[in-house]
Image (cartoon, rainbow, N blue to C red):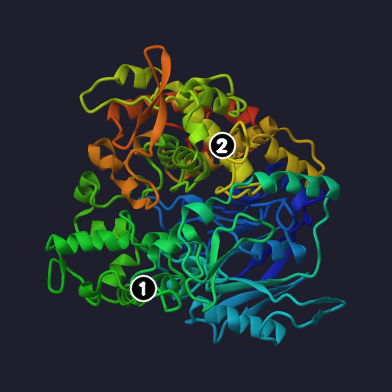
């Protein structure tokens, strides 16, 4: 067994109420997280084109090799399976959650959990080290996430809090179980349902709470008294001591903390991106939670608390321009939605918009599928389609969802975010590449004093294995007057150079972020304001921790190649589910000046903060990019160049046999061939 792994993956069949053990070593080459989960899904899910609500859907929870160690930002877990949120197709997808669940799972001796089938009545899974039982969820079904966790804690330990010694066979601990559960949102099969752990941490994207609800799975509880073997503890401690002084506490400076609060982190981390308050309410990740405080003072019940405890997606419900509430308000202001209107708003109190009372009414309408809540429980894309407004509202930008029904998230001018989501399965929700740049521009006179060419050269050297092409960072785009299109096609946002950058981004993320499970708030560390030369710790930092924990001398480039392999496996799954070049299109508003409107949702970014490098007249300059939008023809040319970069068929966007076989995915090529969906000549 390789250090960093427990060597075992738990397989739970809810239909048969049975468990089995899979050998992690068979899958270690994929790292962990998304990589191993993708292979398990490929092997175990017979029909990959079913709905996420189908009992045949296989859901995998996977940790990474660094989880449970001192490696910062690595105490996370991937949740993979067919999601129920994306539109128009329920793609094989992923979500990610931090906190302590993944760490406790490894301390119990498990690298992951595979969930199959459907129980005939509500159940929960109880894991105490190597003992696993499937329990009756009587008394739990119908409860919100906080009371669910309290009740399971009591059932497992007989205690009500920390600090009391408990005996489990020959081991003792003062720790209670870590619990991942659904709330009423998931039980009602809402596509907004989340998997919740603790108070403010969730696997929010993809509607996996609804998937668990369809499986009659209320929760998984785990308590472990073991530990994780580390290959070189001294090297791990040295790496930690090297990184921590150079890790900027971004949240302590950028985002507002309520009075009386303190910041905390996930297991093993020091980033401090969570907020805790004495009252116990409003304990949220700062990215969204602080933006959804509503008008209730700190210490009282907030809209965020209601959403979290109901087990609904806070990002979809938060008061941002791309989410449920604002869309409803705009329809209300237009006279389309309201009591007795074309779209009847009952039971929502529209006059209380912006209050905790409105948030509570909205949540309860969704989880009870009452009135307009029945439509909203299906997500806005499906609700808008039912209301006959989908096409027109996507075209105008009133419904601000760029691709697959997901909301705006740094899609422009950081086009690698928009493109990455388009050719993937969901909003990729990756922060570091863009947020580090914005922070550097906003807070560093030293950064702003550097020549643009120097910054470009510094960053392009980090883009291994494509680190010989600075034009990957050229953000030239067509201007509203039609100028600069030639440059945008040659070296800018529609070029083959940009295609390579997006490929780098996808491969990096699939391995280092989603499989090794580094936090996407911290990695890649492009810029570092704590370093004299501003150059971040990537690519050294990623490999240094991995080698210290596992003992494997894996190079950064080798990790990138594994990421490419995982990305191609994911692509093959999507092709079997119906993916084709013709369907990879942005919503209409992305091709108009309204495309950049979503940037107003970022409350710590002001006009002029989006300054990015462009190559003009033989030299590098910096331009403000607040008004960027796409050209349809340009995007089509970019797609062709991207497919070429990935080695996929340019007419269909399907992987070719040549590409799959050079990655060792011979069986994947054979399966696509049998389905008539293998790209290029066989």
In this image, 144 relative to 166: left or right?
left
Where 495 falls versus 386 (above or below)?
above
Where 416 falls versus 641 (above or below)?
below
The image position of residue 119, as x and y in percent, is 56, 74
At numbered mark 1, what does the secondary structure look like: helix, strand or loop? helix
Q: Nearer the viewer, residue 30 or 354?
A: 354
The label number, if any, that marks residue 363 in the structure image: 1
Question: How many numbered circles are shown?
Answer: 2
- Residue at 22% of width from left, 63% of height from top? 329
Structural distance between the alpha carbons of marks 2 and 1: 40 Å
Report which residue position mark 2 lands on.
527
In this image, 2 relative to 405: left or right?
right
At numbered mark 2, what does the secondary structure look like: helix, strand or loop? loop
Q: Is residue 673 visible?
A: no
Count neighbours of disc 2 (C-alpha within 10 A) and say few if under 14, some if 14 to 19, many if 20 or more.
many
Task: Give the mark toward the camera: 2 or 1.
Answer: 2
Where 103 falls versus 585 (above or below)?
below
Count neighbours of disc 1 (C-alpha within 10 A) and say few if under 14, some if 14 to 19, many if 20 or more.
many
Q: Residue furthest top?
A: 618
The image position of residue 92, as x and y in percent, is 50, 50
Where 476 falls versus 591 (above or below)?
above
- Residue at 18% of width from left, 60% of height from top? 331
Q: Is residue 163 visible?
A: yes
In this image, 220 relative to 347: left or right?
right
Q: Quadrant of the C terminus?
A: top right
Q: Which quadrant of the structure image shows residue 168?
A: bottom right
The image position of residue 267, as x and y in percent, is 67, 61
Q: Nearer the viewer, residue 672 or 27?
A: 27
Upstream in sequence: badge 2 or badge 1: 1
- Residue at 55% of width from left, 25% of height from top? 460
| Whether label 2 touches label 1, CB < 8 Å | no
In this image, 650 relative to 596: left or right?
right
């Amino acid at each position: 067994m390789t250090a960093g792994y427990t060597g075992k993956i738990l397989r739970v069949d809810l239909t048969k109420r049975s468990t089995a053990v899979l050998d992690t070593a068979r899958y270690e080459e994929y790292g962990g997280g998304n990589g191993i989960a993708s292979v398990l899904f490929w092997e175990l899910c017979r029909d990959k084109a079913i709905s996420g609500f189908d009992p045949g859907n296989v859901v995998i929870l996977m940790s990474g090799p660094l989880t449970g160690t001192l490696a910062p930002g690595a105490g996370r877990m991937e949740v993979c399976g067919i999601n129920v949120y994306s539109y128009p197709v329920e793609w094989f997808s992923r979500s990610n959650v931090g906190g302590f669940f993944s760490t406790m799972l490894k301390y119990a001796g498990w690298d992951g959990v595979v969930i199959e089938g459907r129980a005939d009545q509500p159940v929960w899974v109880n894991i105490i080290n190597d003992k696993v039982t499937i329990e009756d969820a009587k008394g739990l079904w119908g409860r919100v996430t906080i009371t669910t966790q309290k009740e399971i804690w009591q059932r497992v330990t007989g205690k009500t809090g920390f600090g009391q010694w408990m005996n489990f066979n020959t081991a003792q601990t003062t720790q209670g179980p870590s619990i991942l559960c659904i709330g009423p949102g998931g039980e009602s099969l809402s596509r907004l349902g989340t998997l919740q752990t603790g108070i403010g941490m969730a696997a929010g994207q993809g509607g996996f709470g609804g998937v668990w609800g369809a499986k009659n799975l209320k929760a998984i509880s785990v308590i472990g008294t073991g530990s994780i073997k580390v290959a070189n503890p001294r090297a791990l401690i040295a790496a930690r001591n090297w990184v921590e002084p150079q890790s900027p506490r971004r949240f302590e400076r950028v985002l507002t903390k309520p009075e009386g609060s303190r910041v905390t982190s996930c297991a093993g981390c020091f980033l401090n991106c969570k907020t805790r308050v004495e009252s116990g309410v409003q304990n949220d990740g700062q990215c969204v939670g602080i933006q959804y405080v509503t008008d209730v003072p700190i210490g009282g019940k907030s809209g965020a608390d209601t959403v979290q405890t109901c087990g609904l997606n806070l990002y979809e419900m938060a008061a941002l321009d791309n989410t449920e509430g604002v869309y409803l308000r705009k329809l209300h202001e237009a006279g389309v939605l309201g009591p007795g209107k074309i779209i009847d708003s009952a039971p929502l109190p529209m006059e209380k918009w912006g209050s905790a009372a409105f948030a509570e009414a909205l949540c309860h309408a969704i989880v009870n599928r009452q009135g307009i809540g029945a439509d909203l429980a299906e997500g806005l894309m499906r609700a808008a389609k039912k209301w006959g407004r989908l096409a027109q509202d996507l075209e105008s930008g009133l419904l601000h969802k760029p691709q697959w029904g997901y909301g705006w998230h740094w899609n422009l001018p950081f086009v690698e975010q928009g493109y990455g989501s388009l050719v993937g399965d969901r909003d990729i929700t990756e922060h570091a590449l863009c947020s580090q740049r914005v922070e550097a521009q906003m807070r560093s006179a030293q950064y702003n004093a550097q020549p643009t060419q120097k910054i470009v050269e510094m960053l392009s050297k980090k883009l291994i294995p494509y680190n010989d092409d600075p034009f990957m960072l050229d953000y030239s785009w067509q201007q509203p007057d039609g100028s600069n299109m030639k440059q945008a096609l040659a070296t800018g946002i529609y070029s083959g150079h940009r295609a390579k950058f997006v490929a780098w981004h996808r491969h990096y993320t699939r391995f280092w972020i989603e499989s090794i499970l580094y936090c996407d708030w911290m990695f890649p560390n492009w810029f570092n304001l704590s370093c004299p030369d501003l150059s971040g710790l990537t690519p050294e930092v990623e490999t240094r921790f991995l080698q210290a924990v596992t003992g494997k001398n894996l190079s950064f480039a080798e990790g990138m190649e594994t990421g490419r392999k995982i990305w191609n496996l994911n692509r093959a799954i999507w092709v079997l589910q119906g993916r084709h070049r013709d369907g990879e299109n942005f919503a209409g508003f992305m091709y108009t000046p309204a495309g950049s409107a979503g940037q107003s949702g970022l409350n710590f970014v002001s006009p002029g903060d989006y300054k990015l490098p462009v190559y003009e007249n033989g030299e590098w300059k910096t331009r403000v990019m607040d008004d960027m939008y796409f050209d349809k023809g340009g995007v089509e040319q970019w797609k062709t160049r991207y497919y070429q970069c990935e080695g996929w068929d340019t007419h269909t966007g399907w992987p070719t046999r040549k590409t799959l076989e050079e990655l060792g995915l011979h069986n994947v090529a054979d399966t696509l061939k049998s389905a008539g969906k293998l790209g290029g000549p066989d």
